[in-house]
Amino acid sequence: MADNSLASRLYNGEAGLNVVGRRKLWFGVAGILVLIAILSISVRGFSLGIEFAGGNSFSVPASVGTLEQAEEEVNAALAAENTGVEVATAQQVGGTGGDSYELRTPQLTVDQTNAVKAQIAEDFGIDPGSISSNQVSEAWGSQVTERAVLGLVVFIALVMLYLILRFEWRMAVAAVTSLLLNLILTAGIYSLVGFEVTPSTIIGFLTILGFALYDVVVVFDKVQENTRGITANNNQTYGEAANLAVNQSLMRSLNTSVVALLPVGGLLFIGAGLLGAGTLKDLGLVLFVGMAMAFLTSIVVATPMLALLKNYEPRIQAHNKRVQARRGALARGEVPTKGAVSPAQADAADAPIDPDSAALAGAAPKVGARPAGKRPTGARGGRPGGGGNRPGGAKRR
């Protein structure tokens, strides 16, 4: 007995999910999520790392105690020197010299930095040389941001050009809309969670753009295959052919996304969560959320958006109307379906309906087929009785 489960139908591309037909639902959900993301970014903003906000970082050996103890001592040293600031972030990092605690503070002067460093060493009872400090200017973060925005603009321009040359401009618009939606939703989740924005985050954003583009191209390639020459028949609309392409490529996109998300999930949940590698959580979160969003947006946003844009094309509008008109005529019985004979034809023949002849009589000619007729006879397709040799006779002069 054939397996008719959802997994089997998904694998064979026969799930029949109405993705394109429910585009209003998907667009509505996407609009609500975008609104939430924009509100979060506007109200909460981002937790900028030291590379973007500027500040100081102090690295102390992990042998001094727990991370909480190290943070308390550094805050006490900051208060003792009347700096007026506290530790912004604290995390455990690994290095060639062993584990250490990295504690970041807002911007301090050089004198304040040296005084705090000496106070920390005195409180912990360690050599001041074992404590390292770094200072990052806010201008460096501004340069990184400008270069990241420039890279994003160049990437989107190249994507538009590639998709226009590979497919058409409507597919390019739908794909870029999906990419931008992916970026906004990922940034919104990053803002809601409150993770630090670091250079690793920017690298992650640029990485998920490439992954999202791959997902969209896979689906659009199948859409192009299904809709090639679609106006030559009246069997299905453009939206139905695009929806079929989504169902046929859904399992492939799902497998690709799961395979990509497994190592990223390990990086985020095991590396950053269980092992405490704080430097991995910035990259892990943006990759995990971005790849998951890329899969969803390529299915429920990019293809429905493409179908919506194509439905405004006059050629596709006329084709869709022909398909609907033919279906309406079939429903009213005005057009015999293939393999059927109307009652009038059966009465005129005054004979029982023969299945073989009925199939031939009711079949509509294919587009571009020549009219059916009797096959001409004779040596060159001429009428019998004209010139030419007759069996057993002589030539007519």
Image (cartoon, rainbow, N blue to C red):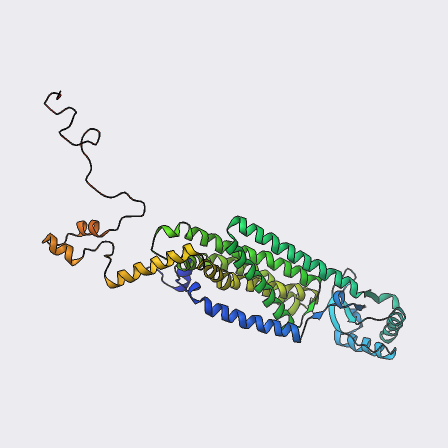
Is residue 327 visible to the viewer in this orientation of the structure? yes
Which residue is pictured at 29% across the width and 44% down the height? 369
Which residue is pictured at 50% across the width and 71% down the height? 28
Please identify the quadrant where the C terminus is shown.
top left
Residue 210 image position (x, y, % from top left):
59, 56
Residue 120, located in which quarter of the rendered image? bottom right
For this view, does 211 lie left or right of residue 323? Answer: right
Q: Is residue 250 above or below residue 57?
A: above
Residue 187 image position (x, y, % from top left):
63, 67
Please identify the quadrant where the N terminus is shown.
bottom left
Which residue is pictured at 68% across the width and 71% down the height? 46
Is residue 193 visible to the viewer in this orientation of the structure? no
For this view, does 247 lie left or right of residue 358? Answer: right
Q: Is residue 214 above or below residue 269?
A: above
Name the foreground residue: 98 vs 225: 225
Name the foreground residue: 270 vs 311: 311
Which residue is pictured at 11% across the width and 20% down the height? 394
Residue 205, located in which quarter of the rendered image? bottom right
Name the foreground residue: 47 vs 323: 323
For this view, does 254 lie left or right of residue 104? Answer: left
How many numbered discs sit on the rendered protein? 0
Residue 145 image position (x, y, % from top left):
71, 62
Residue 269, located in which quarter of the rendered image? bottom right
